[in-house]
Amino acid sequence: MLYVVGTPIGNLGDVTLRALETLRSVDFICAEDTRVTLRLLSHFEIKKPLVSYHEHNKLERGPEIVARLQKGESCALVSDAGMPGISDPGEHLIGLCIGNDVPYTVIPGPVAFVTGAVMSGFPTGEITFMGFVPQKKKDSAEFMERLKAKTGTVCVYSAPHDIVGTLKLLRGTVPSRRLALARELTKIHEEVLRGTAEELIAYYENTQPRGEYVIVIGPPDSLSGDGLSPAGDAAEVDIAGFLKKVDGYLESGMKRNDALKAAAADFGLKRKEAYDLYQGALDEQ
């Protein structure tokens, strides 16, 4: 029997009782990175044999795992974080089980793109998950054309070293759609940045990207959960919240122009709108 087990995407407190019971009961565990999984198991004092199963060895290792399952052993399949089978090689092993009549079940757990979609505040009645943007130029261009055609909220994943490049692709494809960048979800430094692709690119001119990202692209002409329009309407901004954000950036050591630029990206404002709001608040003091 194969158990597809969801694990925390950051905070170990998000693991379920059923997941822990399963990990304790199986004969062995298949892990994307055994070192990452070992930390999880050690935290909960679980000792089980680990088998490496990842994108680069799945064609060789998959049949070996299925053969063990056919002999009556039980196995838990886990990824580095979240649900196996979501943008990881777990889907290949599940397919092998189906093709060989090997029973399997899913132990649900956290999913990064679902968490990011909810955090974004965008409408969630229609969500499309598209995984990682392809690296090859032709493939990424086709990917972006498919994304552009989506009418609902869209979620993609990005590593920190790819985030600016992905934002530039989005700027050329959906320049007016609102974005939410959710990073370090469930962790201490969890953060959501909002704005258009252009505004977020400007933010990263002076800020080093850190952590794994869920990029959430709002529907065309939709309102985000913070009440801002896709173009960023200064008349609807929470002025107190905006000023507090600017002050926070200033206290962190940013120069005023950089702080205004960063806060503008957070609130979906154009730079001039952000400057006018800030200057207006100073004039009233």
Image: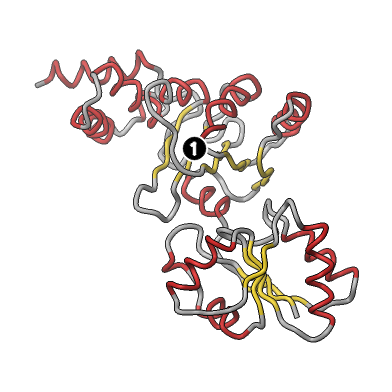
Quarter of the figure that contains the N terminus: bottom right
Give the vertical position of 228 relative to 66 (above or below): above
| Of residues 166 and 46, the one drawn nearer to the viewer in this rendering | 46
| Of residues 168 and 49, the one drawn nearer to the viewer in this rendering | 49
Would you name the residue on which mark 1 appears? 180
Q: Is residue 209 left or right of residue 64?
A: left
| Of residues 236 and 259, the one drawn nearer to the viewer in this rendering | 259
Residue 185, position as x, y percentages in the image: 45, 51
Quarter residue 141 falls in? top right
Is residue 153 in view?
A: no
Is residue 83 in view?
A: yes
Color style of the picture: secondary structure
Residue drawn at 74 percent across, 32 percent down? 143
Residue drawn at 73 percent across, 56 percent down? 89
Quarter of the figure that contains the C terminus: top left
Residue 284, position as x, y percentages in the image: 12, 20
Q: Residues within 10 Å of mark 1 (few under 14, many from 20)?
A: many
Residue drawn at 41 percent across, 39 percent down? 226
Amino acid type, mark 1: Ala
Residue ranking furthest to the left = 285
| Of residues 148 and 86, the one drawn nearer to the viewer in this rendering | 86
Residue 59, position as x, y percentages in the image: 82, 57
**Mark 1 falls on what kind of element?**
strand
Give the vertical position of 274 relative to 134 (above or below): above
Quarter residue 277 falls in? top left
Question: How many circles with numbers are drawn on the protein?
Answer: 1
Give the vertical position of 152 relative to 54 (above or below): above
